[in-house]
Image: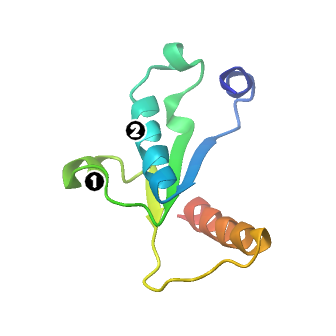
Amino acid sequence: MFIFLSLKQDYKLRLVGHSLGGASAALLAIMLRKKSKEELGFSPDIISAVGFGTPPCISKEAAESCASYVSTVGFRIRFLLSSFVELFVIFNWVVSLLDAG
């Protein structure tokens, strides 16, 4: 993956997860963004993360410092996804919001 990203200059790396996976995606994005271009083989600026239903995993200060590239989506009501198609539609909606903002 790192080799591919170093070859494709117009691609971005978006880490996505749900619950603990969202927290892991956020932490990995924070860790990778601290690396240099030489260490990664591509610019760390292309890395972002989106978490769905992510539990708090960092301090308020750390969350504010990574707000430009880590986003979380939470719902106040529980919902049940009946199919992968519905999850895909929700994911694309969130991606379009992030790309527009």
Query: Is 84 situated above or below 57?
Result: below
Q: What's the amino acid at mark 2? A: Ile
At label 1, counting other C-alpha atoms closer than 10 Å, the crowd grade (few under 14, some 14-19, many 20 or more) is few
Nearer mark to the viewer, of 2 and 1:
2
Query: Is 30 situated above or below 56?
Result: above
- Counting from the top left corner in percent of width and height, residue 71 is at 45, 58
- Counting from the top left corner in percent of width and height, residue 13 is at 62, 40
Q: Which mark is residue 64?
A: 1
Residue 9, quarter of the rendered image = top right
Q: Which mark is residue 41?
A: none
Residue farthest toward the top in the current orientation of the protein: 38
Which residue is painted at 38% across and 28% down in the image? 34
Q: What's the amino acid at mark 1? A: Glu
Q: How many marks?
A: 2
- Counting from the top left corner in percent of width and height, residue 36 is at 45, 19
Q: Secondary structure at mark 2?
A: helix
Which residue is painted at 73% across and 67% down in the image? 88
- Counting from the top left corner in percent of width and height, residue 5 is at 69, 28
Query: Is 12 situated above or below 57?
Result: above
Which residue is painted at 73% across and 79% down in the image? 82
Q: Secondary structure at mark 1?
A: helix
Per the model, the C-alpha gap separating discs 2 and 1 is 12 Å
Which residue is painted at 67% across and 77% down in the image? 81
> Which one is nearer the viewer's eye here, 60 or 69?
60
Q: Which mark is residue 30?
A: 2
Q: Earlier in the sequence, mark 2 or mark 1?
A: 2
At label 2, counting other C-alpha atoms closer than 10 Å, the crowd grade (few under 14, some 14-19, many 20 or more) is many
> Would you say 51 lies left or right of 31 here?
right
